[in-house]
């Protein structure tokens, strides 16, 4: 069944609805390992952080209501990762399997490509999360890694599946400068 929807840039006024959509996934799903659903004010803060970096945060509207969202965030703080972002996508449970998730991922990917990013990563919680894994596959992501038993939610160990989508020619050398608006995150550690 296909239902018409449109994609647009997120606005501050969307935070309450985004919080409700995400809240369901936090409390009932394993796609995110967050365990306490953030309030609308925290969603607004996260939106500002994404937008301050010049990255896209898009929403889908169907039948006059917000039914899903997707955004890109920096993948890692080290400057070597400046051409890579990570996406997150969530769709209202009553709007699943209508093409909204793929459309949101494609829209954010197109915006990231225009900004000069070359790779998009995604981390899907729970290797049994067939819906999210299938969604990312339909959007052109491929599985590149699998971390076993790295999280606990709902009283059980959970894996994380890492996926990647390329936005540029694999043979092209990197640009001399980073993407427009690149600001490294300050809250990450690691390789």
Image (spheres, rainbow, N blue to C red):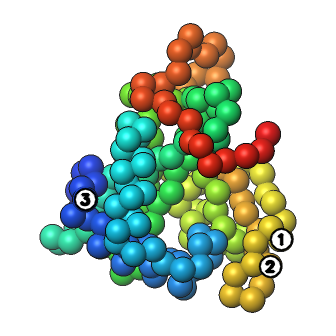
Q: Quadrant of residue 130?
A: bottom right
Q: Which residue bears the numbered disc 1?
A: 149
The answer to whether residue 4 shows anywhere in this view is: no
Q: 21 or 92, which lies in front?
A: 21
Circle 1 SS class: strand
Asked if disc 2 and disc 1 are in contact, CB closer than 8 Å, the reply is yes
Which residue corresponds to the image point at 28% horizontal and 54% vertical from the top-left? 10
**113, above or below 143, in the image:** above
Circle 3 SS class: helix
Q: Extreme right residue here?
A: 148
Which residue corresponds to the image point at 81% horizontal and 60% vertical from the top-left? 147
The answer to whether residue 33 shows anywhere in this view is: yes
Q: Which residue bears the numbered disc 3?
A: 12
Q: Is residue 17 left or right of residue 75?
A: left
Which of disc 1 and disc 2 is earlier in sequence?
1
Q: Which residue bears the numbered disc 2?
A: 157
Image quarter (top left, top right, bottom left or bottom right) of the C terminus: top right
Q: Is residue 171 left or right of residue 53?
A: right
Instruction: Tell me residue 12's x, y (percent).
Output: 25, 59
Circle 2 SS class: strand
Which residue corresponds to the image point at 64% horizontal and 28% vertical from the top-left? 79
Instruction: Tell me residue 139's x, y (percent).
Output: 50, 50
Instruction: Tell me residue 103's x, y (percent).
Output: 37, 53
Q: Measure the C-alpha gap from mark 2 to mark 1.
A: 5 Å
Which of disc 3 and disc 1 is earlier in sequence?
3
Q: Is residue 27 left or right of residue 57?
A: right
């Amino acid at each position: 069944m296909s239902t018409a929807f449109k994609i647009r840039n997120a606005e501050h006024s969307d935070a309450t609805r985004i919080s409700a959509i995400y809240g369901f996934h936090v409390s009932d799903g394993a796609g995110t390992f967050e365990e306490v659903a953030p309030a609308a004010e925290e969603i607004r803060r996260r939106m500002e952080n994404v937008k301050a970096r010049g990255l896209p945060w898009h929403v889908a509207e169907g039948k006059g209501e917000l039914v899903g969202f997707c955004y890109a965030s920096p993948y890692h703080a080290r400057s070597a990762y400046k051409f890579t972002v990570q996406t997150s996508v969530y769709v209202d449970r009553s709007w699943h399997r209508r093409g909204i998730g793929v459309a949101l991922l494609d829209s954010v990917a197109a915006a990231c490509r225009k900004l000069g990013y070359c790779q998009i990563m995604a981390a899907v919680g729970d290797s049994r999360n067939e819906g999210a894994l299938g969604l990312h596959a339909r959007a052109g992501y491929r599985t590149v890694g699998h971390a076993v038993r790295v999280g606990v939610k709902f009283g059980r160990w959970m894996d994380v599946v890492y996926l990647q989508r390329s936005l540029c020619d694999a043979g092209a050398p990197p640009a001399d400068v980073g993407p427009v608006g690149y600001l490294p995150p300050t809250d990450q550690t690691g390789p």
